[in-house]
Amino acid sequence: MIILAEKLMHEGEHEKAGNLLEKICKIEGWTGVDTNVNIFAGLTMKDIQDAKARILASKQPPQLEN
């Protein structure tokens, strides 16, 4: 199918080639409804608050001793 899409591109049939490539992507499972990734899955609010506190603490300038 990829070879056919390349042939269509060389013949100037760009829209048909694009449609074919889209179908290939769907067949291979590269596109679909589940393309979004939730990086917070499985984290509790406490986990998120702890991570936020660590990030904010790492951005604080060091305290000078007198």
Image (spheres, rainbow, N blue to C red):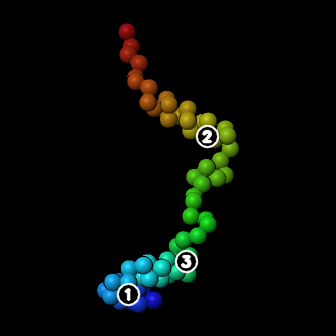
Dot 3 falls on a residue whose secondary structure is helix
- Using the image, determine if residue 42 lies above or below residue 33: above
Labelled pair 1, 3 in contact (Cβ < 8 Å): no
Percent position of residue 56, x then y = 50, 31
Q: Camera-side residue: 59 or 65?
A: 59
Q: Is residue 6 visible?
A: no
Q: Which residue is mark 2?
A: 48
Q: Nearer the viewer, residue 12 or 63?
A: 12
**Neighbours of disc 1 within 10 Å: few (<14), some (14-19), many (20+):** some
Taking 25 as reference, is 63 left or right?
left
Describe the element under mark 2 as helix, strand or loop. helix
Badge 3 crowding class, 10 Å Cα cut-off, few under 14, some 14 to 19, many 20 or more, is few
| Residue name at image x 42 percent, y 82 percent | 17
Position in image of residue 20 (x %, y %): 47, 83
Task: Indicate which disc, 2 or 1, sits on the residue closer to the N terminus.
Answer: 1
Q: In this image, 60 relative to 36: left or right?
A: left
Q: Nearer the viewer, mark 2 or mark 1?
A: 1
Task: Identify which amino acid the numbered label 2 is placed on.
Answer: Ile
Q: Which mark is residue 26?
A: 3
Residue at 55% x, 77% y is 26
